[in-house]
Structures are given as C-alpha cells and as structure tokens.
Amino acid sequence: MIGNPVNSSTLRMLDMTIFVRGYDRQTKTQLMLEIFLAMSATVLRSIPLLNMSIKSNSGKSE
C-alpha cells in the first residue's frame, strides 16, 4: 500500500503544488506530515484484517 505508484505520484504532485504556491518550509513540512499521518492511519486500520487472515491461515496448517 505504501509502495503504491498512485500514492507516490499523488504525493509528488502535492509536493510540486506546495512548492509552486510558495508556502514556507514550516507549512510545507506540516502539510506533508499531515498527509503521512493520514496514510499511516489507513495502513493501521488495515492491520487487524491482515492479522485475522494470518491467524486463519496458520489455523488451517496446524
């Protein structure tokens, strides 16, 4: 999910937009941090699903 080409190109596009608009470094860092936190929250939400599938797979093998 993190290595998704769509996500990285979107981030690159946002980075360029922020640069072109001429935000100062602090604002740019804050925006990138917020984007990163939003992506992290999405990943964390999918972890319980991954754990469930791992448990069900290990249960079948035993």
Image (cartoon, grey):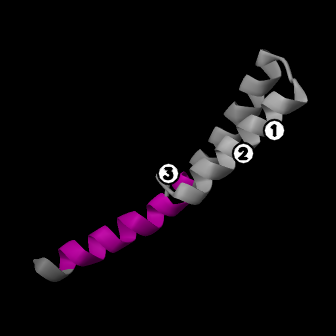
Above or below 14: residue 3: below
Give coordinates of residue 31: x percent, y percent. 77, 33
Label 3 neighbour load within 10 Å: few <14, some 14-19, many 20+: few
In the picture, the disc for residue 2 is 3
Query: Label 3, label 2: how many angstroms apart (C-alpha)?
Result: 16 Å
Q: Secondary structure at mark 1?
A: helix
* Quadrant of the rendering where the C terminus is positioned: bottom left
Residue hosting label 2: 13
Left or right position of 6 against 14:
left
Which of the two discs, 3 and 2, sits closer to the camera?
A: 2
Q: Amino acid at mark 1?
A: Thr
Give coordinates of residue 47: x percent, y percent. 46, 59
Query: Label 1, label 2: how many angstroms apart (C-alpha)?
Result: 6 Å
Which of the two discs, 3 and 1, sits closer to the camera?
A: 1
Above or below 3: residue 12: above
Q: Secondary structure at mark 2?
A: helix
| Residue 26 belongs to the span the image colors magenta | no
Give coordinates of residue 29: x percent, y percent. 72, 24
Q: Amino acid at mark 3?
A: Ile
**Residue in the image at 35% along x and 73% along y:** 53
In the picture, the disc for residue 17 is 1
Label 2 neighbour load within 10 Å: few <14, some 14-19, many 20+: few
Q: Do the residues bearing badges 1 and 2 touch, measured as CB atoms within 8 Å?
A: yes
